[in-house]
Image (cartoon, coloured by chain):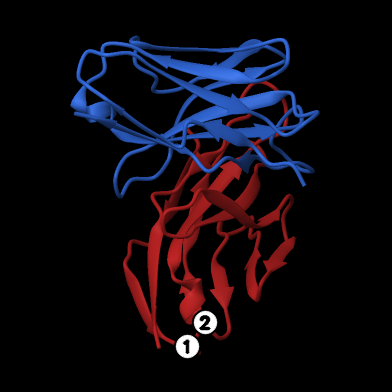
Chain colours: A blue, B red
């Protein structure tokens, strides 16, 4: 079965550079979530989209932006990278909402290292 | 606000031991509850879920029961294996569009010794 695809799997950037992370949800899933997981930390919610519109916003820095495109894939753009941005970034997708009959399926994550 | 609290790790057990990882939650409304597992170097996988009070989620020998009266969703397994070594996250989520993100606990690292 198709899963959530994230690219790239690994990314190394220098401070002050820009990075773009991509997420391809499971087919027919209309909701995408982005999470950031620092070393030894729990995943922290960044932002979510439903039907190409931002639906919720968490602890996402102003230097980051994201969008969901017409084919439902999503991109997380990160500018002016800082060392503290080094983390594992997860994307998850679900059908309409997480709740009683659905759950979020996670991608393998993109490991971003800022040097 | 909504939150999840789970027991701190690491938890170290011998193979075939009984496992309990405690999880309690605070929520307005009636969330669904989840346990996710993260194996070394991998992403998050849904282990089990329960969508209403008294539901029991089960998978791969793991079980958890949604206890509304104690706002708990403790994870249990009768006999753990070395391959169960991973980080386990308790989580909650809501249906509907207003607040549909998953909220995670801080994770509990489990080490199983052969």
> Camera-side residue: A112 or B76?
A112
Q: Which mark is residue B80?
A: 2
Res A60 quadrant in image: top left
Q: Residue A53 carries which label?
A: none
- Asked if badges 2 and 1 are on one and the same chain, I answer yes
> Camera-side residue: B15 or A7?
A7
Q: What percent of the width, then of the height, locates residue B27?
A: 55, 40
> Camera-side residue: B97 or A20?
A20
Q: What percent of the width, then of the height, locates residue B88?
A: 47, 59
Q: Which mark is residue B17?
A: 1
Q: What percent of the width, then of the height, locates residue B84?
A: 50, 73
Res B47 quadrant in image: bottom right
Q: How crowded is mark 2: few (under 14 residues within 10 Å), some or many (20 or more)?
A: many
* On-image quarter of the C terminus of chain B: bottom left
> Camera-side residue: B2 or B70?
B2
Chain hosting mark 2: B
Q: What percent of the width, then of the height, locates residue A5?
A: 61, 35
Residue found 38% across the figure and 82% down from its top: B13
Lateral position of residue B42 relative to residue B33, left or right: left
- Residue B111 vs B95, above or below: the answer is below
Which callout, 2 or 1, points at the residue further toward the start of the chain? Answer: 1
Callout 2: SS: loop
Lateral position of residue A14 relative to residue B95, left or right: left
Residue found 34% across the figure and 16% down from its top: A61
Lateral position of residue A26 relative to residue A19, left or right: right
* Callout 2 touching callout 1 (CB < 8 Å): yes
Callout 1: SS: loop
Chain hosting mark 1: B
Residue found 43% across the figure and 40% down from its top: A43
């Amino acid at each position: 079965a198709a899963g959530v695809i994230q690219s790239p799997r690994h990314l190394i950037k220098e401070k002050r550079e820009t990075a773009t992370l991509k997420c391809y949800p499971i087919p027919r899933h209309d909701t995408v979530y982005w999470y950031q997981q620092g070393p030894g930390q729990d995943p922290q919610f960044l932002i979510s989209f439903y039907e190409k519109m931002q639906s919720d916003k968490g602890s996402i820095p102003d230097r980051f932006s994201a969008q969901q495109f017409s084919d439902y894939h999503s991109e997380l753009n990160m500018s002016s990278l800082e060392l503290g941005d080094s983390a594992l970034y997860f994307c998850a997708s679900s059908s309409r909402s997480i709740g009683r009959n659905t759950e979020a399926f996670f991608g393998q994550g993109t490991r971003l290292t800022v040097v | 606000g909504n939150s999840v609290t789970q027991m701190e790790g690491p938890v170290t057990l011998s193979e075939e031991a009984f496992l309990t990882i405690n999880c309690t939650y605070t929520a307005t409304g009636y969330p669904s509850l989840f346990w996710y597992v993260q194996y070394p170097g991998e992403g998050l996988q849904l282990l089990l879920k329960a969508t209403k009070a008294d539901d029991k989620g089960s998978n791969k020998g793991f079980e958890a029961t949604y206890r509304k009266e104690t706002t708990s969703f403790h994870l249990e397994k009768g006999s753990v294996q070395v391959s169960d070594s991973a980080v386990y996250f308790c989580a909650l989520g809501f249906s509907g569009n207003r607040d549909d993100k998953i909220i995670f606990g801080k994770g509990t690292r489990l080490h199983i010794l052969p």
